[in-house]
Amino acid sequence: MNFHVMTLFPGMINNAMGESITGRAIKAGLINVNAVDIRDFAINKHSRADDYPYGGGAGMVMQAEPVYLCYRHICSQIQKKPLQDEEGIIKKEPGIRVIYLTPQGKVFNQKLAEEYAAEKDIIFLCGHYEGIDERVTEEIVTDYVSIGDYVLTGGELPALVIMDAISRLVPGVLNNCISASTESFSDNLLEYPQYTRPAVWRGKEVPPVLLSGNHKKLAEWYREQSVIRTALMRPDLLEDAELTQAERKIADGITRKNKI
């Protein structure tokens, strides 16, 4: 999996992705992170990639040309050949996903993570200030994505969130090959509660079934706890969850009780 990030702050991307699980995955060659500074493609001697907005208003807007030139540079890296542009003609490379991180996009979720994980190369476009000149986003962006209904100072943090979620789905990134398939949202259910040593902590005991060694009972307990936790914390997810009649009865009982 190759992540390409168009950003004004490549250090934010490289530093964060170079740590923990994603850092090990990069060293192992399982994922690659290519953070490209949009300022390197500025068309003025001061390397400024922003300007005042037409029509007035507060803040600055990122210019179209540096963003477009950065995009074409990354596309040439992906295609492994120089791209020929006719002067004044905007060219969009087919088959390359360009994700623009914006509060106006569709909200990111696990299904989107799974969809993106099937791609070989993904380009992230990180905006700043009051946004990016609409003319370039109209031409190069394929996906408008948000990580929630709030506003951040830039697109780098959302890009990191999405790259982290995708990376966990890349084969070999997680040491335990079944981890990604049993975590929250994998079946529209939240993950069951986790425990570790000691078996008794400040008078609170680990559920006995976890010490039983009975794999059948463990699997049943995991599933039941996932249903219970989802009904308690995210009942909205249950609409699309595939539950048995017994599981549906448990979930319905909890949701009814919570409404009282």
Image: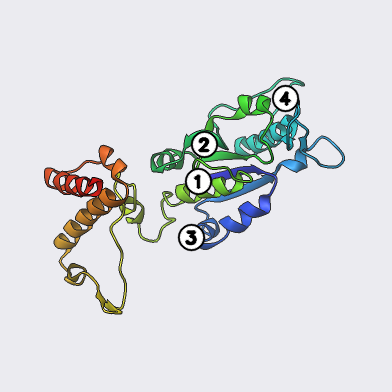
Which residue is identified by label 4? 85
Front label number (4 vs 3): 3
Q: CA distance from mark 1 to mark 2?
A: 10 Å
Front label number (3 vs 1): 1
Q: Are marks 2 and 3 in contact (CB under 8 Å)?
A: no
Q: Are marks 4 and 3 in contact (CB under 8 Å)?
A: no
| Dot placed on the residue nearer the N-terminal end, 1 or 4 | 4
Residue displayed at 72% across by 41% down? 38
| Dot placed on the residue nearer the N-terminal end, 3 or 1 | 3
Which residue is identified by label 2? 145
| Dot placed on the residue nearer the N-terminal end, 4 or 3 | 3
Helix, strand or loop at mark 1: helix
Which residue, as the protein is rendered here, is positioned at the far right?
45
For label 1, the crowd category at 10 Å Cα-Cα, with few meaning under 14, some 14 to 19 and many 20 or more, is many
Q: Position of residue 17 (x, y in %)?
A: 56, 55
Front label number (2 vs 3): 2
Which residue is identified by label 1? 162
Q: CA distance from mark 3 to mark 1?
A: 14 Å
Disc 3 marks which amino acid? Answer: Ile
Disc 2 marks which amino acid? Answer: Val
| Dot placed on the residue nearer the N-terminal end, 4 or 2 | 4
As displayed, is residue 249 above or below residue 177? above
Residue displayed at 66% across by 44% down? 7
Q: CA distance from mark 4 to mark 3?
A: 39 Å
Disc 4 marks which amino acid? Answer: Asp
Q: Toward which corner of the image does residue 214 lie, by quadrant?
A: bottom left
